[in-house]
């Protein structure tokens, strides 16, 4: 068995949740925050059999889009103006960041 951990943009989370239910996959959604943008995103935990991992990845790929996001300028720590970029920067935020982990044991009580 595997645990698929997928970090996706909030805008894609409803479509992804619906597609997973339609595909008969069980999933848990957590509200999360990206370390770089410090903006909300959504983390899915999807436990599934090894042979179904590719189906899960296909569903994630089909429902999560790349988007450009503007990052507001951040003042430099300690007042060093050399590294300060005074205008917003475009960052490409992925469709999804996915980790596939082995599961040693799975129980439902
Ligand atoms: P954030 O950390 O808010 O990152 C948002 C986007 O900013 C990233 O998109 C990437 O394009 C850019 N970015 C992140 N760190 C950067 C840095 N040090 N320098 C320049 N640009 C940077 P994605 O790579 O698609 O990541 C989307 C979200 O997925 C991330 O949000 C984070 O929540 C999660 N994530 C990505 N890689 C991860 C990892 N290795 N471990 C844990 N979470 C990860």
Image (cartoon, rainbow, N blue to C red):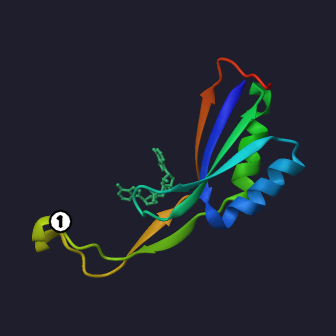
* Residue at 75% across, 62% down: 14
Crowding at label 1, few (<14), some or many (≥20) Cα neighbours within 10 Å? few
* Residue at 67% across, 59% down: 64
Q: Residue 77: give x, y in percent of width and height.
A: 17, 65
Q: Residue 97: give x, y in percent of width and height.
A: 56, 49
Judged from this view, the residue extending furthest toward the front is: 109
Q: Regarding mark 1 in the picture, which secondary structure is present there?
A: helix
* Residue at 41% across, 55% down: 35
Task: Examine the image and state in which quarter residue 106 appears.
Answer: top right
Instruction: Classify the position of the C terminus by image quarter.
Output: top right
Depth check, front residue: 105 or 55: 105
In the displayed structure, does residue 47 sit left or right of residue 68? right
Q: Residue 93: give x, y in percent of width and height.
A: 51, 62
Whether 75 is drawn above or below 46: the answer is below
Judged from this view, the residue extending furthest toward the bottom is: 87
| Quadrant of the picture in which ligand 1 is shown | bottom left
Judged from this view, the residue extending furthest toward the top is: 104
Task: Examine the image and state in which quarter residue 86 appears.
Answer: bottom left
Count of numbered marks = 1
Task: Examine the image and state in which quarter residue 78 appears.
Answer: bottom left
Q: Residue 75: give x, y in percent of width and height.
A: 23, 73
Q: Is mark 1 within 8 Å of ligand 1?
A: no
Instruction: Classify the position of the N terminus by image quarter.
Output: top right
Depth check, front residue: 50 or 41: 41
* Residue at 75% across, 43% down: 27
Depth check, front residue: 32 or 91: 32
**Residue ID for mark 1:** 77
Whether 89 is drawn above or below 51: the answer is below
In the displayed structure, does residue 29 sit left or right of residue 23? left
Whether 53 is drawn above or below 14: the answer is above
């Amino acid at each position: 068995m595997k645990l698929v951990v997928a970090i996706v943009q909030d805008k894609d989370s409803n479509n992804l949740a619906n597609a997973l239910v339609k595909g008969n996959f069980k999933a848990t959604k957590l509200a999360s925050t990206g370390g770089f943008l410090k903006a909300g995103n959504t983390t899915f935990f999807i436990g599934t059999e090894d042979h179904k991992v590719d189906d899960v990845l296909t569903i994630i790929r089909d429902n999560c889009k790349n988007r450009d996001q503007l990052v507001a300028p951040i003042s430099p720590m300690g007042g060093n103006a050399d590294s300060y970029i005074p205008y917003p920067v475009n960052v490409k935020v992925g469709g999804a960041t996915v980790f596939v982990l082995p599961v040693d044991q799975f129980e439902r009580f």
